[in-house]
Image (cartoon, rainbow, N blue to C red):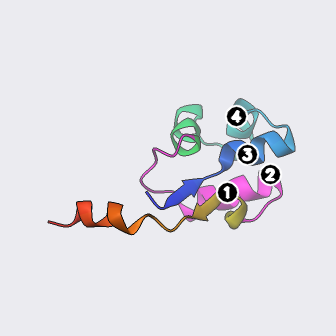
Amino acid sequence: MPIVVNLDVMLARRKVKLSDLSDTVGVTLANLSILKTGKARAVRFSTLAAICAALDCQPGDILEYRNPDPALLSEDLP
């Protein structure tokens, strides 16, 4: 997937544990873990805003677009 989640990087930079972030933003540890591992298929703007407020960062610090290899894209076409 061309969207990469760098939540683990921001947590390490801010020296914040995932469980502490969960308590602060009011999102379950399980849901934050899914987001952190990049397995989430969507994220609410309100959740992203709460994470950014708690970690004092911008959405671009957490979400990154990486241009995929064009050869990989052809595999997704029917």
Q: Label 2 neighbourhood size at 10 Å, few (<14), some (14-19), many (20+)?
A: many
Horizontal and vertical percent position of residue 58: 75, 65
Dot 1 lies on which element?
helix
Q: For the point 72% across and 61% down, which residue is it?
A: 61
Horizontal and vertical percent position of residue 2: 47, 62
Q: For the point 73% across and 40% down, which residue is it?
A: 21
- Of pointers 4 and 2, the one earlier in the residue sequence: 4
Q: Nearer the viewer, residue 27 or 58?
A: 58
Horizontal and vertical percent position of residue 25: 69, 46
Residue 62 circle label? 1
Please name the residue that numbered disc 4 is placed on: 18
Q: Quadrant of the C terminus?
A: bottom left
Mark 3 vs mark 4: give the one in front: 3
Mark 2 vs mark 3: give the one in front: 3
User: What is the C-alpha distance between the residues marked 4 and 2?
Assistant: 11 Å
Please name the residue that numbered disc 3 is placed on: 9
Whether residues under marks 1 and 2 lie with C-beta atoms below 8 angstroms apart, the answer is yes
Please name the residue that numbered disc 2 is placed on: 55
Measured along the vertical axis of the image, is residue 50 above or below residue 26?
below
Magenta range: 37-58
Q: For the point 79% across and 51% down, which residue is it?
A: 54
